[in-house]
Amino acid sequence: MFRFAPILAGLTVLAAMLSAVLARDESRLPAPRSQAVVESLAGTCTSRPDYLGTASCTSSSCHHKSEHRRVVGSEFVTWNSEDPHRKAFDTLYSIRSERMVRNLYGPDAASASKTVACLTCHATGEGQLSKASTSFSLVDAVSCESCHGPAQPWLAAHTRGGFKELDAATKERDFGLWNTKDLARRAQVCSACHVGNPDVPLMQVNHDLIAAGHPRLNFEFSSALAKYPAHWRMADEHARTPDHAWRSWQVGQIAVATAAVRLTEARARRSADGAPWPEFAEQDCFSCHKNLTVDSDRVAYRTPTTAGRAPWQTWYTGALDLADSEAYNTLASLKTHMGKPAPDAATTATRARKALEGLTRRIAYATDREPWTTAQELEASTRIARFSSVNAEKLTWEQQAQQFLALAALRDDLRRRQGQIEAGYELPYLTVRDSLLGQFPNGYDSPRSDPNEMRATRDRQLLLKRLQDGLDGIARSQP
């Protein structure tokens, strides 16, 4: 009888959560007639528009001085040729995107490239053209103004003498040029699309969108920043923050957790107006999406101590305790409440607001603290690697992956600060990375068990052994 307990508990949580949804009169999926579309791709406003488009930045005397990429003065060339955000709009013409809008709005749905819900993140200006100049075009995808703010208030001012001498905070406060030099502010800007923006209801990926075919969002700031084709001087970044990669990881962990809590708080409030609650996109997917058989690999591995519950924000808070234990502790009450089968919305909103107060304090500390020395980074790398190795079988994939990204940030700093670039130093990191990626079968956006449970258990043990070998190698590589 004991062996069936996790299954029965899992069915209980499913029943409770589904009953909370089915008790409502409204459908979770929007009706086809509710699809908001744009008829034109070009801006229409000529009187005091907010968004001016990339054309306002591409003068040969401004940000298009040469055709050399990653050179200051040629930021447009870097963005146009290398930046993945440049392709965000093109993604809407894919077969997958077209299938998604049909799944959401019906067989007669308009193209994804015309759908406001898609353009909100895949184009600049939240998919709206009413405040855009005639030179603005959604085809430019996620461009300059998505990261630096609508250009109308600051475009002219930033070309005048004396503007460069102002500090970045003043430029944002007085002119609206977003302070992306500040890592916390930069992470906040990124999180608006990559985690979700509660101030723009359509700028988020909910359970309906995932069910329609959209990948779940599992953004991690430091790794995204490391891969990003910088159009600024990285030497300046390292001068401001010698422990740049590690600080980016710490700040990013708190920033994306903050964005996730803000979403939860807003969704809880909007439930009073009929919005779906709870929002399943915030819960651990595999609490429900698993094989409910006695020896299921998902039951045995994914939820050994949480059967009957759907843990909240397993990705965005998976390693927050490593980044900042005080920030993690501010979420304790909210996490416990959100783990219930049907968390009360009003209580959720109250606890989320309380958590946001603590997170705001901690992100300020992480941003302004003294830089870590190489000795501190070496100690942290050894400690995290050993902890992850010893607890590998107990940790979920999300926790393992987040801890690896912490180790990768430390590696990047140590490699730059100490010159450790030999192949032997890189090998254990590659082993850990490949063992984590090995849990993704081809064609899947998330880890998935093999339908053959015996083979799944065997493969998991092999991957865990490789994971532990790599982590032990990282710990040994630090002097």
Image (cartoon, rainbow, N blue to C red):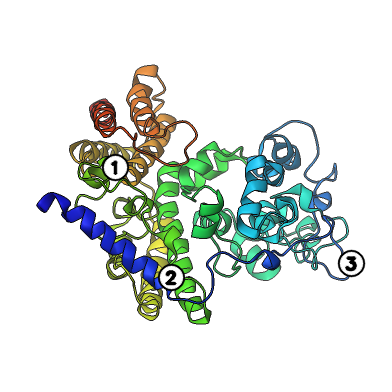
Badge 2: residue crowd in 10 Å (few <14, some 14–19, many ≥20): some
Q: Is residue 105 left or right of residue 197?
A: right
Give the number of the mark in front: 2 or 1: 2
Q: Are marks 2 and 1 in contact (CB under 8 Å)?
A: no
Where is residue 392 shown, x and y percent of the image? Answer: 23, 38
Q: Where does label 3 land, which residue?
A: 46
Q: Amino acid at mark 3?
A: Thr
Quadrant hosting residue 59: top right
Mark closer to the chain start, 1 or 3: 3
The residue that label 2 is drawn on is 21
Disc 1 element: helix
Tell me: residue 456, above or below residue 353: above
Q: From mark 3 to mark 2, how far is it between C-alphas?
A: 45 Å
Is disc 3 placed on a helix, strand or loop? loop
First in sequence, mark 2 or 1: give its number.
2
Crowd band around label 3 with a 10 angstrom C-alpha radius: few (<14), some (14–19), many (20+): some
Say which residue label 1 marks. 376
Along the line of sight, the residue nearer the viewer: 126 or 173: 126
CA gap between label 2 and label 1 equals: 49 Å
Q: Which mark sits nearer the N-terminus, 3 or 2?
A: 2
